[in-house]
Amino acid sequence: MNKFLSLLESPTPLLADGAMGTLLHTHGVEHPHCFDELNLTDPARVADVHRQYIDAGAQIILTNTFGANRYKLHKHGLDDKTAEINRAAVALARRVVDASFKPVLVAGDVGPLGVRIAPYGRVQPHEARAAFAEQILSFEGVDLIVIETMTDLYEALEAIAAAKEVAPQTPVVATMTFTRDNRTLLGDDPAKVAVALRDAGADVVGVNCSGGPAQLIRILREMRQAVWTPTSPDVGATSETLHSHPYLWVKPNAGWPEHVGGRVMYAAAPEYFRDYALEFWKAGANVIGGCCGTTPEHIAAMRKTLDAHPDIQVEAVQPVDAVSTSETAGVEPPSELAQKFAAGKFVYAVEMDPPRGLATQKLVAAASLLKEAGADVIDVADSPMARMRMSAWAVCDIIQRKIGIETTLHFPTRGRNLLRVQGDLLASHALGVRNVFVVMGDPTSIGDYPEAADNYDLVPSGLAKLIKQGFNAGVDHAGASIGQPTSFYVGAALNLCSPEPETEIKNLKRKLKAGADFFLTQPIYDPEKARGFLQRFAEETGAPLDRPVLVGVLPLASVRHANFLQNEVPGIVIPEYTMQRMNQAGDMASREGVKIAVELIQHIKQWAQGVYIMPQFHRYDLVAEIIEASTL
């Protein structure tokens, strides 16, 4: 048996190396440079990386050939040196291993081609296979071939086929990378990927890159579930049998990358990887290592903990119907807003209106200001006051991409039939929006186009039910599959100062039954009256409201503004003492409005989970001041 395959039979996982590119970059090699060319131009630098991983305890090192295929090398004018670069990489790795006098295996590293292949690109499958074959043919003397970081299952299958054709005696590892929703970029789930790679002939299947260890252990378990078959649902791992002998490989990133000061940084420390090494072992991994952001320190930490635990009981594979839904493919982590609520953080949400034209520069600047001030989430209104504005989905996308702060999309049902509602939900999810505030919306009669259609098929509670019990379960309104469940976090409206509290409590119960996750309220100016509504709800139902509430805060800008809200906006009641303060402030009324808002927030902090601030007249500077003052 091949040495690599025989070592996989060991009860202790093999330890592979960590990132090559991360170390080369920290050693001064800039990313525009071709890292693979260093095998020829600066072999000592590459050798030093190999040596550090071997010294850290790695049993497998990957050659510096991740991008050494004709397509990627062509971008650097090096495609005519494809074979030379790959042969040099293998020889270099082998020399370092021989000099170490340690039983370390050399793996020929094969990365994606960097081009799309048919049916989603111009490169034909046979052309892709030929490019992979050209690279693999140059791997003379490797102990195994590692096909990694694949995003396209079609491409991975062509790489496996090429390896089987030109190096039939060499074991093949094939691993894919996944997005935050536990799918490949083309939407394939871990179970489908694992079975396809196994059936194509890979000796080892798995996952690398993607996110950090927490995500990859979920993916690993699903892959193992797909390719292992227990002989009986109530027996342990020792009685499990394989369909056709695939082992499991996992190499996570050191967390999700962040851009800090112009540099890409990874948060996961070596100690974190040390702990997860045992978790991967328990989950059935045969090979463990690190990908982007990991260093020899990460590998050394894992080596130490693996050596300190010579025997770990591997988890039994559960029957399909016994797998926890939290471990299945397609299940995303909660939105950042949901996580902040769960952690007990007092949340600051700020409303922003989309622009009435194409320009988004002011909107982006305002969102940046709010993020710096401490806002947790930006709420994007949809056609407020029934006036024509840019699509709220586009605004959410722009803010999340350019500013890096999460958004909540206001999703009115008015003016949308059932087809449009569902299509718009899919569009929102595809753009990365996870928080949705369902609301009826303003009637078109008050807006720019009073004759526009104003029909709707769903009331807000019906939309909440469609999302929570339909889309988030993977089916549409008709019960047909949408392929992958959505992961929306759904908000609904709540009036804490309603003149008809009995009716409001009835509506609240209906929204809770529909599955609402959190609530946004209308602006309040009497915090004790608002708190009294929640106390009344608890008395009538026998339990306090168990969902987070973001209490509406609308800063008063002037005496005229306060009078307008008091007399012309339904549902808003401003106490007499507040009106007196605004009148007495005179020319400093806007400053008094800021003080009143800060005082309101201090009261609200005692009984609610956050505030929902609604800037007036685009005074985002005042909102930033309010957030900063109320967090002191």
Image (cartoon, helix red, strand yellow):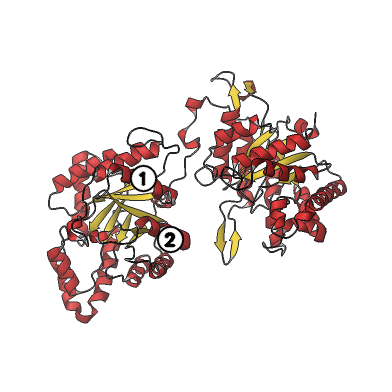
- Identify the amino acid type marked 2: Ile
Report the Cα–Cα distance between label 1 and label 2.
20 Å
Q: Crowding at label 2, few (<14), some or many (≥20) Cα neighbours within 10 Å?
A: some
Q: Crowding at label 1, few (<14), some or many (≥20) Cα neighbours within 10 Å?
A: few
Query: Please, which residue is most extreme toward the bottom here?
Result: 587
Q: Looking at the rendering, which quadrant does residue 107 occupy?
A: top right
- Identify the amino acid type marked 1: Gly
Residue linked to disc 2: 398
Name the residue nearer the viewer: 122 or 230. Answer: 122
Task: In the rendered view, tell whether residue 481 sits above or below residue 209.
Answer: above
Residue linked to disc 1: 423
Task: In the rendered view, tell whether residue 309 sits above or below residue 371.
Answer: above
Where residue 117 appears, as percent x and y from the top left, is 61, 45
Tell me: 242 left or right of 356.
right
Tell me: 15 left or right of 327.
right
Task: In the rendered view, tell whether residue 234 sits above or below residue 566.
Answer: above
Task: In the rendered view, tell whether residue 173 sits above or below residue 352.
Answer: above
Tell me: 306 left or right of 479.
right
Where residue 631 appears, as percent x and y from the top left, is 37, 65
Name the residue nearer the viewer: 506 or 528. Answer: 506
Give the structural element (helix, strand or loop) at label 2.
helix
